[in-house]
Amino acid sequence: ERWLLLPRRGIHILDPNRHDSSKMGFLVKGKPLSWKESDKVREYVKKHGVEQFIHIWKKNKDREDLDFLWGDEVEGFLCQLTEKEGKKAIKLSLRGSEVLEKLKEAEKEETEKAEEKAGCGTCPPSVIFHPEYGCFMIETTPSAPYGGFVRDLRCVEANMRLRRAKVKEHLKTGEVYSTMTTYPLMGVDKFTLPPHDPNGPVAKSQYVPDQLINPHPRFATLTANIRTRRGSKVDIRVPMFKDKNTPPADTEIHMDAMAFGMGCCCLQTTFLARNLEEARSLYDHLAVLGPIMLALTAATPLYRGRVADTDVRWSVISQSVDDRTPEERGEVPEAKEKALKKSRYDSISLFIADAANAYFKDKYNDLNVKFDKEAFDRMRKEGLDEILAKHIAHLWIRDPLVIYQSRVELDDTKDVDHFENIQSTNWQSVRFKPPPNSDIGWRVEFRTMEVQLTDFENAAFTVFIALVSRAILAFALNLYIPISKVDDNMHTAHKRDAVTSHKFHWRQDLGSTISQHMLKKNGGTTVTNPLKSTSGSNNGGLKASGFMRSIIEVKESEFRDDTLDNFCRVKADNRFVLVYGELDEKGESWCPGCSRALPIVEAKLKSFQSSTALLKLPVSMKLFKDNEKHPYRIQERLNIQSIPTLIRVGAKGIFDTPLASKWCTDTFCVNQYMAYSAAKRLRGGSTKALLKEDSKGNDSISETTIKKIMLGQGGSEPLGLIPIVHAYLDMIECDSETRKVVNGYLDLIADRASGKLMTAATWIRRYVELHPEYKKDSKLNEPLVHDLMNTLDRVTDGTLAAPQLLGEYSNFNKKQMEDRDGEVIKIKGAEKQLQLKINVKCSPLHREAS
């Protein structure tokens, strides 16, 4: 794992300030203003936030980032388990800040050792730890982003395991670091360690004390300002699960503090886009996936000592930071024009693809979205297109919540505080992240996934969404559905057992350049012709021998007027034309230089980490030599003088200056010439895919199960996302070692989607249902939660297998477990009691740990 410790680049795509101990996220030194104190500067901050974004946009609108960088964030919490004289107890441990300080000291020592060993200060520690809203929480990230190589997919799980191991080094006896989404007894009696009373001056909650809020002044100010702006405490309501002995009057679980939402743990991923256009397209498509992945990762059935009738955390967080006034919540009939439909933590309300996107239609933005007219007009005046300007202006209907006294008057060309003040407190399902005036490009953050209990699961979902994001771009997938249906899907995702019991709106035609007949039974790709002539079926003599890395050969006799036009329609990041002397039966060219050039060009072609296409035009000695009227010599775009000749094909079918024949046999020159094309990332002419519509022009959108969304319809449209990911892995020629690891991840997700394996939410429900302390009254007590957290900790460690949750992966235990019997928890609906000890032989995992 030595390579995990090496820096990939001196940036962090998750947050520009992660490496600065004085700035974590948007944490800065200084005094934040109370709501009353900020009254005089809020409009100033909003106005200058727009100016800061305009500057960012102008500076970076044409920016291109060649590397694919990405990362993840995993959050967890601390709790303390005790058992004395047969009495079991559990408390939420407020030692998060203390543990973080110890982790920082360890980071510093590790960095110093790396400097001493490497002789420089460029080697960062392999992981980084960050504070979160609750002082019982710890957020973990890799110290540097993962890269664009397939081997980076194997890095994720190993890095997550390393993070967890480092946290556990600083825990006390009986203390547990859990990546469960919520602490089940938050708000029940004195649930913290050390104990504190509720009804503090910040949250004024009847359930939770202020002492569990992170001591950094930002968090207390954020909590108080939300409550003050709203005009009351937040009012969180979750339907309660009605069991056999649940009192009839108990219909809801009530919570009244930001901690119930922002104290939830989650799993988030961030992707660096190639450019602004790609970021906007990826933002839209990931927004459609948001509810699907929320349901698939469901892990939150317990709140405030009660069993909920929902499975996910999203609405609880949304309600916990809902700062809307009574007028904005629609509670004042005479002020309906001020009503805002959503909390500032919710699903997105606008797709933001630009006009060049072939799939986007105005009708998909079917919500009546309110926006700041002044901000919108200002951005339009500076040249922003209508959709992007409306997106930012929509965020600007919210007020800045935390303003630092010392950070009001700033240089809008250098600072981004005012923009980030509002941008970072619009917590939506997907976040569009502009470059923050540093060496970071346009990014997209995917925010809906629930954190999972084990590192294997978290790595599986992280890698999956990363691969889906690549497949969306590589195969030009079209996932668009109306925003209103995305909202419907978000509501459906909250329902109990939504994965197997409910349906979601989904496209029946993904409008992709990949089609069903291109998928093998195992999800791979076969060779087809990606070129279609607009004038006939002969394709201008083109015969493709690959997909997304296409080598297309056209004989002299097959060359037609539209051959080059058809090649320009190939959707590839890098396109080249090679004219050379034809080969004989032994594979030798009559032109010696061509024999040397061919393998050099083809080798470079295989090295690209993006889609490529090569049009090979072999010529015979008889027809080409000394023939000044040969079609390739007189063709305006080719204008071949000698062979071999290599030509780049850029945007809009523009043929660049060719590489001279004498340099086509030089490996360095060929590599430099072809690499320049990759650096420019010039796309070919965009071709709108034919989308299936009915006679009225409506899209083919219907309700379907997550199983079909993930696995497909079994021989008909739409394609499943998992087979598409397999096709993408085939396309990029994923190595066998990485493929073995990723296949395990995809198998887990497929089994969750099909219902073969339980979601964490269902598994936890069954555990509670079968525990002897549960009285079927929808209530939890300390002994039950003690056993639950202890069990989950052992499942996470691998010392206890949970086959209904993890399937065959539940046998991925500590090394000593391979040689002895282990314990297994089996939870089935038909069982009447919890089976804690069932001896089975633990076999090693079918794959090796990365």
Image: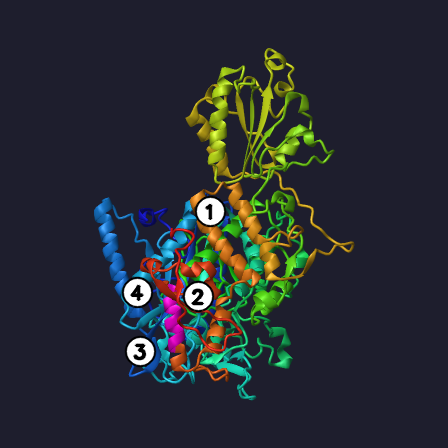
Q: Where is residue 586 drawn, in percent x and y?
A: 53, 18
The alpha-carbon separation of the residues under discs 3 and 2 comes to 23 Å
Give the camera-side residue of 782 and 594: 782
The local crowd at label 1, few if under 14, some if 14 to 19, many if 20 or more residues have their Cα within 10 Å, is some
The region drawn magenta spans 786-796
Question: Disc 4 residue type?
Answer: Lys
Instruction: Place residue 415 in its image quadrant.
Output: bottom left
In contact (CB < 8 Å): disc 4 and disc 2? no
For residue 573, side relative to residue 565 (left or right): left
Question: In the structure shown, which secondary structural element does the residue marked by tag 4 occupy?
Answer: helix
Mark 1 lies on residue: 739
Q: Looking at the image, can residue 370 be seen? A: no
User: Any magenta on residue 370?
Assistant: no
Residue in front for this viewpoint, 45 or 688 = 688
Could you tell me the amino acid type at mark 3?
Thr
Q: Earlier in the sequence, mark 3 or mark 1?
A: 3
Residue behind mark 3: 82
Label 3 – label 1 distance at C-alpha: 43 Å
What's the magenta bit mostly, secondary-structure-wise?
helix
Give the alpha-carbon distance from disc 2 to disc 1, as whole Å: 25 Å
Tell me the element at label 2: loop
Sequence-wise first label, 4 or 2: 4
- Indicate which disc, 1 or 4, sits on the residue closer to the N terminus: 4
**Above or below 207: residue 169:** above
Task: Report how far apart the C-alphas of labels 1 and 4 lie in the structure.
Answer: 30 Å
- For label 1, the SS is helix
Give the CA distance from mark 4 to mark 2: 22 Å
For label 2, the residue is 802
Residue ID for mark 4: 168
Q: Give the mark nearer the N terminus: 3 vs 2.
A: 3
- The image quarter containing residue 149 is top left
